[in-house]
Image (spheres, rainbow, N blue to C red):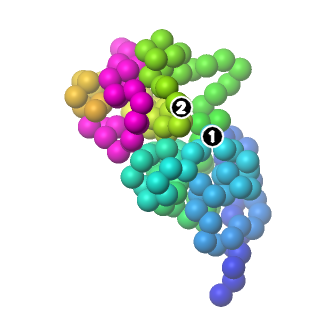
Amino acid sequence: MSEEAQLSTTVNGDQWSGTVTVRWTLADFLRERLRLTGTHLGCEQGVCGACTVLVDGMAVRSCLMLAVQADHAEVTTIEGLTGPRFSALQDSFIRHRAFQCGFCTPGFLVAAEEILGSGQTYSRDELRELLIGHVCRCTGYEPIIEAVYECLA
């Protein structure tokens, strides 16, 4: 069995093709091969949400997905959500002080982008449920919920 496989994917709008180690997770690929270190590795068991990225518009835990599973997919990391200026969501996180140490913030922002992209309106309680799979040990979650809720309006 080969230790490497071909991968063709689009990451943050840029096409990438080459070989990857078959056992690499998507997080490993993003961090090690593409040097996109905004995707944080916390628990490496899919529990904390720090490694959340969008794959074809859906939030996934990149520590649980193999890189080869992203073949022909469009991947968006926290780096892909930023441009020359902060997004409205990022500005809202700043206004609401929705981060402290910042380790969980990329995962929350990416997950919130999926929520906002759905076009649906959610209550604060529904947002808590949607973001329940993300661990933050600093903020107490309320500033995060308020920041996302503000962007739904």
Q: Amino acid at mark 1?
A: Gly
Q: Position of residue 123 (x, y in %)?
A: 24, 24
Residue visible at 43% across and 55% down in the picture: 46
Residue mark closest to the camera, 1 vs 2: 2
Which numbered circle lies on residue 38?
A: 1
Label 2 secondary element: loop
State left or right for residue 57 relative to residue 143: right
State left or right for residue 96 relative to residue 101: left
Q: Position of residue 69 (x, y in %)?
A: 56, 64
Q: Which residues are magenta?
A: 129-153
Q: Amino acid at mark 2?
A: Gly
* Residue in the foreground of this view, choosing between 25 and 96: 96
Q: Is residue 15 above or below residue 108?
A: below
Residue visible at 48% across and 37% down in the picture: 104
Residue 135 included in the magenta stretch of the image: yes
Q: Which residue is mark 2?
A: 102
Label 1 secondary element: loop
Q: Position of residue 95 (x, y in %)?
A: 48, 12
State left or right for residue 122 relative to residue 87: left
State left or right for residue 4 relative to residue 146: right
Q: Mark 1 vs mark 2: which is more N-terminal?
A: 1
Residue visible at 45% across and 35% down in the picture: 108
> Which residue extends farthest top?
95
Quadrant position of the N terminus in the picture: bottom right
Determine whether label 1 and label 2 are within 8 Å by CB: no
Quadrant position of the C terminus in the picture: top left
Q: Is residue 128 above or below residue 36?
A: above
* Residue in the foreground of this view, choosing between 7 and 99: 99
> Which residue extends farthest bottom?
1
* Residue in the foreground of this view, choosing between 148 and 9: 148
Assess disc 1: are there few (<14), some (14-19) or many (≥20) residues with their C-alpha within 10 Å of its C-alpha: some
